[in-house]
Image (cartoon, rainbow, N blue to C red):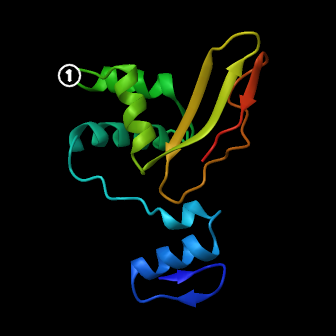
Amino acid sequence: MDCKKCNLEFSTKGAKELHMRVFHPNERKMIVERQLIGRKFERIVGNIEDCFYAFREKNISLVAFGQIKDWINDHTKNGISSPRLANFLRRRPQFKLAKKFRKIGTNQTESYWCLNDGNNPDTDANCRGQGWVEVSVEA
């Protein structure tokens, strides 16, 4: 474990966290490390990953939320509700919110997701037509 700001190495995680809190208090991202989520809901998450792989075979790297929901509802027995799917996409580290659009004059939004596996999708592609504005995606 090392500090990327100071180029110092630490023998324990606690030492690194203490150093980060004292010398770099604004770097909260470096202190909090993502915890492993475990095996709960493994089948549902696997179905969502299968959806992304199916679209990737068609050379589509950014998939709209509605497309994911429709694919899962067509290819699984019970389907999934929108709030539950949104919860899995938001909280699991293997999924990444790539783009978000809002329709002008309304509060209707459309989000585009990708797998967070190191392959960077073409995020410059225009996913929506006229009448839509891109909303900033916060990490």
Q: Is residue 5 left or right of residue 13?
A: right
For the residue marked with disc 1, what is the amino acid? Lys
Q: Residue furthest front?
A: 22
Residue at horizontal 22 percent and vertical 40 percent from the top: 43
Residue at horizontal 49 percent and vertical 22 percent from the top: 66
> Residue 94's spot in the image, x, y percent?
42, 50
Characterize the local packing of mark 1: few (<14), some (14-19) or many (20 or more) Cα atoms within 10 angstroms. Answer: few
> Residue 16's spot in the image, x, y percent?
48, 79
Q: Is residue 109 above or below residue 50?
A: above
Q: Is residue 121 above or below residue 119?
A: above
Q: Is residue 96 above or below residue 66?
A: below
Q: Is residue 112 left or right of residue 82?
A: right
Q: Is residue 89 left or right of residue 39?
A: right
Q: Is residue 92 left or right of residue 115?
A: left
Dividing the picture into quarters, in which one does residue 104 lie?
top right
> Residue 75's spot in the image, x, y percent?
29, 26
Q: Which residue is mark 1?
A: 77
Q: Residue furthest top?
A: 105
Dividing the picture into quarters, in which one does residue 77 lie?
top left
Asked whether 59 or 123 is in front, the reply is: 123
Residue at horizontal 41 percent and vertical 89 percent from the top: 11
Count of numbered labels shown in the rendering: 1
Residue at horizontal 62 percent and vertical 20 percent from the top: 109
